[in-house]
Image (cartoon, rainbow, N blue to C red):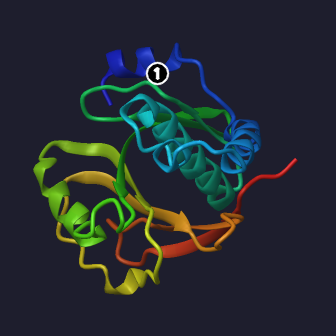
């Protein structure tokens, strides 16, 4: 990470994902019970893309916080090679990570969407050794992390996260797939 990037990151406003997700869930329930069109309910319009990505960033950071045992915050500061910045404190040191979001969209949105295609597409990152990539697995079905073939990538880390309960109350975070032994961490959607 160069010093300019670090100085920029230090000046950003970071959001605690827990209250953000709790408030968002209240809105999601209201919208789900309304006669709002399905594309809007699923945040599948261009005007709602930023909200969808912030939700994904918050879910990833909440799950990563559970995994690390410390709060991980996010700033929706998008740049050419990342969608948000994550930040956490370990002892006296504050850490920052640039994170690129990817999504395996639901099959009804794109029947050809697959996690394998997204992972293969990561080969385009040729000089991103400090970039973390978080893939939101937004499809029903079973994910077998041991079966995911990950080629040698030039990124800092690769994570997959997805819902593992129909009511979206339980999630899993798998990774780091750039290491030899990735593993999963289950976490719950935060509640009041």
Quarter of the image for residue 164 reads bottom right
Please state if 136 lies on the left or on the right of 59 as rendered: left
Residue 24: percent from left, percent from top: 69, 39
Q: Single out the residue that lies furthest toward the right.
A: 192
At horizontal 43% and vertical 15% (from top left) the residue drawn is: 7
192, above or below 172, in the image = above
Quarter of the image where the N terminus is located: top left
Residue 161: x and y in percent read 49, 63
In-front residue for pair 39/182: 39
| Residue 190 to residue 99: above or below | below
**Which residue matches tag 1?**
9
Q: Secondary structure at mark 1?
A: helix
45 and 192: which is toward the camera = 45
Write the residue at 15% across / 42% down: 127
Q: Is residue 190 above or below residue 182?
A: above
Residue 120, percent across and down? Answer: 16, 64
Q: How many marks?
A: 1
User: In the drawing, does residue 94 fall left or right of residue 117?
Assistant: right
Mark 1 is surrounded, within 10 Å at the Cα level, by few (under 14), some (14 to 19) or many (20 or more) other residues, namely many
Instruction: Give the camera-side residue of 99 and 90.
Output: 99
Residue at the far front: name it: 35
Q: Which residue sits at x=17%, y=66%?
A: 152
Could you tell me if residue 96 is visible in this image? no
- Which residue is at 51% across, 18% downward? 10
Instruction: Name above or below for residue 172 compared with residue 155.
Output: below
Q: Quadrant of residue 104?
A: bottom left
Query: Visible in this render: residue 183?
Result: yes
Q: x, y percentage for residue 31?
A: 67, 43
């Amino acid at each position: 990470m160069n010093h300019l990037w670090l100085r920029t990151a230090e000046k950003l406003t970071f959001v605690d994902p827990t209250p953000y997700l709790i408030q968002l869930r209240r809105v999601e329930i209201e919208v789900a019970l309304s006669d709002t069109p399905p594309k809007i309910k699923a945040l599948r319009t261009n005007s709602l893309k930023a909200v969808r990505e912030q939700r994904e960033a918050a879910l990833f950071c909440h799950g990563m916080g559970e995994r690390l045992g410390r709060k991980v915050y996010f700033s929706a500061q998008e740049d050419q090679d990342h969608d948000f910045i994550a930040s956490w404190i370990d002892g006296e040191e504050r850490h920052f990570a640039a994170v690129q979001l990817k999504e395996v969209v639901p099959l009804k949105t794109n029947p050809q969407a697959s996690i394998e295609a997204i992972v293969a597409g990561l080969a385009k990152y040729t000089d991103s050794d400090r970039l973390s990539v978080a893939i939101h697995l937004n499809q029903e079905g079973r994910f077998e992390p041991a079966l995911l073939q990950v080629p040698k990538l030039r990124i800092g880390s690769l994570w997959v996260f997805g819902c593992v309960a129909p009511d979206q109350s339980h999630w899993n975070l798998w990774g780091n797939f750039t290491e030899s032994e990735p593993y999963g961490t289950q976490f719950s959607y935060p509640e009041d």
